[in-house]
Amino acid sequence: MRIGELAARAGTTTRTLRYYESRGLLPARRTGNGHRTYDERDLRLLRQIRTLQDFGFELEETRPFVECLRAGHPQGDSCPASLAVYRRKLDELDALIGELQQVRAQIGDQLARAMGVPPARTESRARERARESLAAEAMVPGGPEPVCELGGRQ
């Protein structure tokens, strides 16, 4: 197939395919008259790259998976280098989850403080009650206007 057909089947652009080719991720086979030519294996490579990018992998992180596919492994993720990328990505995600949990706890503490919840009740249930209370007030048509202790009504 030619570049336009491959791009359409892969749900991408010809420009992206040329970029992948320049980065060595997509083979650069050409016909006698200079047209790029591709096959089903190339489509599978592109789908692997796109799936990984949808999961948050950088383009360069997809290289071991592409090389694994080219080596004849049907999934592209059974080679040691691919497994190493998976492990690194999981470590990254675990670190991000930890950071987000810390931010969430801080916001929950701020909410509890703002709602006047005593320090002894800053457990998750107190935060949950404060959140439910705010949500209920926000849903009442014509409910109370927000009041800021620093500047009166907003």
Image (spheres, helix red, strand yellow):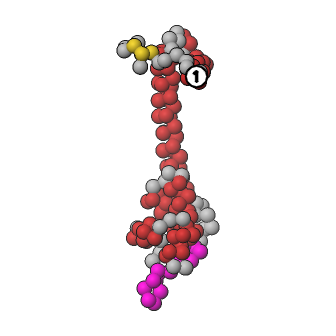
Q: Nearer the viewer, residue 29 or 114?
A: 114
Tell me residue 39's x, y (percent).
56, 77
Say above or below: 107 vs 151: below
Among the 4 quarters of the image, the one containing residue 125: top right
Q: Nearer the viewer, residue 75 or 103?
A: 103
Residue 34 colored magenta?
Answer: yes
Tell me residue 103's x, y (percent).
47, 29
Residue at the extreme right of the image, as rendered: 74
Q: Nearer the viewer, residue 29 or 141?
A: 141
Q: Which residue is mark 1?
A: 141
Q: Is residue 97 visible?
A: yes
Query: Which quarter of the image is occupied by the C terminus?
Result: top left
Say above or below: 21 vs 117: below
Residue at the extreme bottom of the image, as rendered: 32
Residue 24 colored magenta?
Answer: no
Residue range (magenta): 29-42
Tell me residue 139's x, y (percent).
59, 24
Tell me which residue sits at (56%, 58%) in the image: 51
Label 1 sits on what residue type?
Pro
Among the 4 quarters of the image, the one containing residue 83: bottom right
Number of disc labels = 1
Where disc 1 sits, the SS reads loop
Q: Main secondary structure of the magenta part?
A: loop
Few, some or many residues within 10 Å of mark 1 (<14, 14–19, 20+): few
Say above or below: 11 vs 128: below
Q: In the visual, does 120 lie left or right of 60?
A: right
Q: Is residue 25 visible?
A: no
